[in-house]
Structure formats: structure tokens, C-alpha cells
Image (cartoon, rainbow, N blue to C red):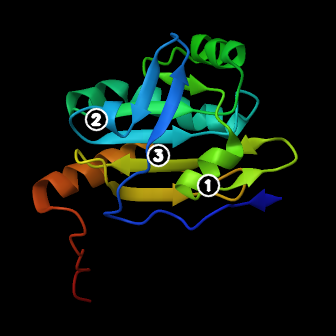
Amino acid sequence: MAHYCTSILDEHEPFPPLTISLTDERLRSIPTDLGPGYGILLLYRGRWCPHCRRQLVDFQQHAEALRGRGVAVLAASTDTREDAIAFAQETGFSFPVGYGLSARSVARATGCFFDAHSGSLHPAGFILTPRGEVALAAYSTGDIGRLGAADCLLCINTWRENGPRTPITPPAP
């Protein structure tokens, strides 16, 4: 069952500060250390989740395009350091991978859902602006429903050209 602790984050809200332990033993402060451009934070359920694996492999397959656009990606979960390292090695992730998140604390800060029984987060993804504000947030209450790399690139390219929250006018019938 999905549980949550607070309201979800909306566009233009400052992203709450999170300190994430990375598999290379560094700490990353989000949003400050995500980079000078747009950033993507992917919260995933764990190494054991096939849907998470598929999402993160998708981001790895788009890693060059994301880097080329100056977009930083960081993925994190409640996994142990050993599981996070193994997951990154199995899949060849070139982006930083965080571990050891407290599901309740992260849910309280970001509004994401979590499973109280397993102690894992449900998937959530955030595109952050260069100012550390939420440009887009995607929350899931279960296995599916998460950001895709191509969609993130399309959104970021559109925002760079037109500014955030540009209304899309459908073509006349």
C-alpha cells in the first residue's frame, strides 16, 4: 500500500534540500550540487524492481544526449550501498547513484509515496531548474508511472526555447 507524508511539490516551488550518499562515498546536496543547468532526480524502488531497471537503463541510453544538453541526472533509492553499487555495475550507469535513503524522510520532504512494509520509495522523478525549483514532478503510487528520458529532453528543450509553462495550443480541427 502506498503511503505519503505531505503534499506533493508543484511547478516553481523550491526543491527541498536533500543530502544523498553516493556509491563513490561522496555526498550530494540536492538541489545545490545537481549542477548549473537543468537536473533530473530519479527516486526508484530498488535494485530488485524490474520497472526501475528499465527506467534507469533508458536514462543511461540517453546519457550522452542529456550531458550534451547540460542536464545532470542522479538516481537514488533506499537500497544498501552494496546493492546500489551492484545495480550500477550491472547496468553500466554513468550517472551518480545514491543509496540508503529513508523512505519516510524523503516522502516527508518531497511528497513522494512509499511502502511502509518494505521501507522502499515508490518511483518519483523531478526535473529541476537551474535555480533549484521544480520544473516538473512525477509521482507514482505503485510499479509504473515514471519519467522517461526522451520526454525529459523534449520538455527541457521546449522550456529553453519558450520558457516553462508555455501553453501548447492544439491545432485547429
Is 8 positioned to the left or the right of 17 in the image?
Answer: right
- The span from disc 2 to disc 3 (Cα, nearest Å) is 14 Å
Between 93 and 25, the one lying in front of the other is 25
- Where does the image place residue 166, in percent across and percent down from the top left? 20, 70
> Which mark sits nearer the N-terminus, 1 or 2?
2
Query: Could you tell me if the residues under marks 3 and 1 are in contact, i.e. CB atoms within 8 Å?
Result: no
- The span from disc 3 to disc 1 (Cα, nearest Å) is 24 Å
Is 70 positioned to the left or the right of 13 in the image?
Answer: left
Is 137 positioned to the left or the right of 36 in the image?
Answer: right
- Where does the image place residue 119, in percent across and percent down from the top left? 79, 41
Label ID, residue 58:
none
Q: Which residue is mark 1?
A: 108
- Where does the image place residue 36, in percent across and percent down from the top left? 21, 34
Q: Which residue is mark 3?
A: 148
Q: Quadrant of residue 48?
A: top right
Kind of residue at disc 1 = Arg
Name the residue: 20% across, 56% down.
158
Between 154 and 117, the one lying in front of the other is 117
Q: Is residue 56 above or below residue 116?
A: above
Q: From the image, which quarter does the C terminus lie in?
A: bottom left
Kind of residue at disc 2 = Val
Whether residue 147 is visible here, answered yes or no, is no
> Which mark sits nearer the N-terminus, 2 or 3?
2
Q: Which residue is mark 2?
A: 71
Query: Could you tell me if the residues under marks 2 and 3 are in contact, i.e. CB atoms within 8 Å?
Result: no
Name the residue: 39% across, 41% down.
40
- The span from disc 1 to disc 2 (Cα, nearest Å) is 26 Å
